[in-house]
Image (cartoon, rainbow, N blue to C red):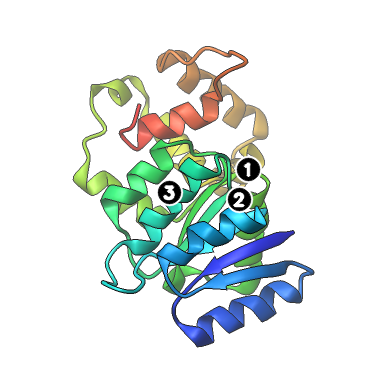
Amino acid sequence: MRVVIAEDAVMLREGLIRLLADEDIETVATSGDGAGLVALVEEHRPDLVIVDVRMPPTFTDEGLRAALEVRERVPGTPILVFSQYVEERYATDLIGGGAEGVGYLLKERVADVAEFLGAVRRVAEGGTVIDPEVIAQLLGRRRRGDRLEVLTPREREVLGLMAEGLSNAAIARRLVVTDGAVEKHISNIFLKLGLQHTNSTHRRVMAVLAYLGQG
């Protein structure tokens, strides 16, 4: 796997490079600002981009805006946002632009190295990993709307875990239920939200976007 890292804190950036190298993940380029990130992605076409939110020169939202530009210029590039902050506007834009190959983790909430590396691989493979606190903050400013009122409390709980990027088996373990029960809940969610199976849409992604107020 080849990654590009956009992180202005030198010690953290070097730590990430060494951590990834121990797992045979090559860091092909790094940037200390958002503007440089876009050019590096166009040049190297990495398997994953890891980006902080607040970067020079204003330390507000440069990283997320750069991530959105990356997705526009090199569509489908997996992006893992790794930050101390939730920047609500651009976070929703990034997820709403296609939740496949998107992650958003808060630095202080990553419990261990294995958890982080698992998220890196999942996002690079096209999965979704979103910290529950990120989801909570996004939903705090956005009404989920009447569309989700048709869901039962358990179905909304399952959908919330789907938004975190958990697989069916992981959801079953979290809720202490069978895999079959989870599959039934997800089928009901798709049915109630009117999400039909087609070759051009990913129902799991569309359900998550509905949960986050994008669909």
Tag 3 secondary structure: helix
Residue 139 point in image, percent of width and height: 27, 44
Q: Is residue 86 left or right of residue 113?
A: left
Q: Residue at x 45, y 82 (%)?
A: 9
Whether residue 154 is visible: no
Q: Which of the pair 178/93 is nearer the observer? A: 93
| Residue type, mark 2 in image | Val
Say whether marks 2 and 1 touch (CB < 8 Å): yes
| Residue type, mark 3 in image | Glu
Tag 2 secondary structure: helix
Whether residue 28 is visible: yes
Q: Label 3: which residue?
A: 69
In this figure, what is the number of numbered marks?
3
Cα–Cα gap, marks 2 and 1:
5 Å
Q: Label 2: which residue?
A: 123
Displayed quadrant of residue 4: bottom right
**Which class describes the residues within 10 Å of circle 2: few (<14), some (14-19), or many (20+)?**
many
Cα–Cα gap, marks 1 and 3:
18 Å
Q: Quadrant of the N terminus?
A: bottom right
Q: Label 1: which residue?
A: 126
